[in-house]
Image (cartoon, helix red, strand yellow):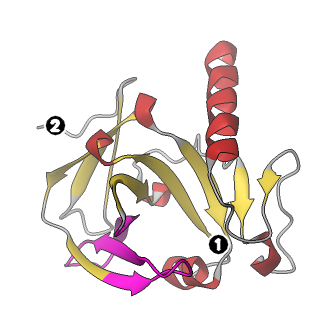
Amino acid sequence: MTDVTTDAYLTGGCQCGQCRYRIEKRRIATLYACHCKECQRQAGSAFGMSMLMPSSALEITRGTLKSWQRPADSGEAVVCHFCPDCGTRIYHGASDLDDVVSLKPGTLDDTSWLRPVGHLWASRAQPWHGLQTGCLAYSQQPGTLDDLESAYAAADRCAAEES
């Protein structure tokens, strides 16, 4: 299989190139930034980004990922999948939701179009970080991500109309 970004698919991979994937672009549910301490640690930065989609929308095209688990605030386990050679996190999922994955969008080949529609754990954002105006912001983890999914769908429609 060739790694090619098309209108239907996006491709990405780890830093060393041993692991590659493709995703169905139309099946992306939402894209948000998370400012919780775990995402800050994992990203080695002020926040992490997450792109939710059904697990069936993600296809690993090269390499074999390793995984480990950590507890979430909810008490469920977060299963983290990464390249065993360079350690780049590709995606994670919750142990109780095996049909949904959270891709780390910084691993996409083309990141120029990424625009989070919301911020989670804004109460833990670094004081110098100005949250985007016009985006949803939650002081902690929201009960559902329905509003984030609606905001992403609306933003995606607007982008399609502009192009």
- Quarter of the image where the C terminus is located: top right
Quarter holding residue 153: top right
- Magenta residue span: 69-95
27 vs 82, nearest the viewer: 27
Q: Position of residue 78 (x, y in %)?
A: 40, 75
Which element carries disc 1, helix, strand or loop?
loop
Amino acid type, label 2: Thr
- Between marks 2 and 1 in the image, the one whose residue lies nearer the viewer: 1
Residue bearing the label numbered 1: 47
Nearest to the observer: residue 147 or residue 102: 147
Q: Magenta stretch containing residue 87, yes or no?
A: yes
Instruction: Kindly indicate whether the residue at mark 1 contacts the one at mark 2 (C-beta within 8 angstroms).
Output: no
Residue occupying the point 30% across, 79% down: 87
The residue carrying mark 2 is 2
Q: Amino acid at mark 1?
A: Phe
Spot occupied by residue 10 in the image (x, y as percentages of width and height): 37, 38
| Residue that appears at 48% across and 82% down | 75
Q: In the rendered image of this protein, does residue 136 appear above or below residue 2?
A: below
Task: Reply above or below: 57 against 130.
Answer: above
Q: Nearer the viewer, residue 163 or 8?
A: 8
The residue drawn where x is 50% and y is 80% is 72
> What residue is drawn where x is 33% and y is 82%?
69
Spot occupied by residue 52 in the image (x, y as percentages of width and height): 48, 50
Q: Residues within 10 Å of mark 2 (few under 14, many from 20)?
A: few
Secondary element type, mark 2:
loop
Where residue 12 appears, as percent x and y from the top left, is 34, 50
Residue 101 drawn above or below residue 158: below
For residue 87, side relative to residue 163 (left or right) = left
Of mark 2 and mark 1, the one earlier in the sequence is 2
Is residue 21 rendered to the left or right of residue 70? left
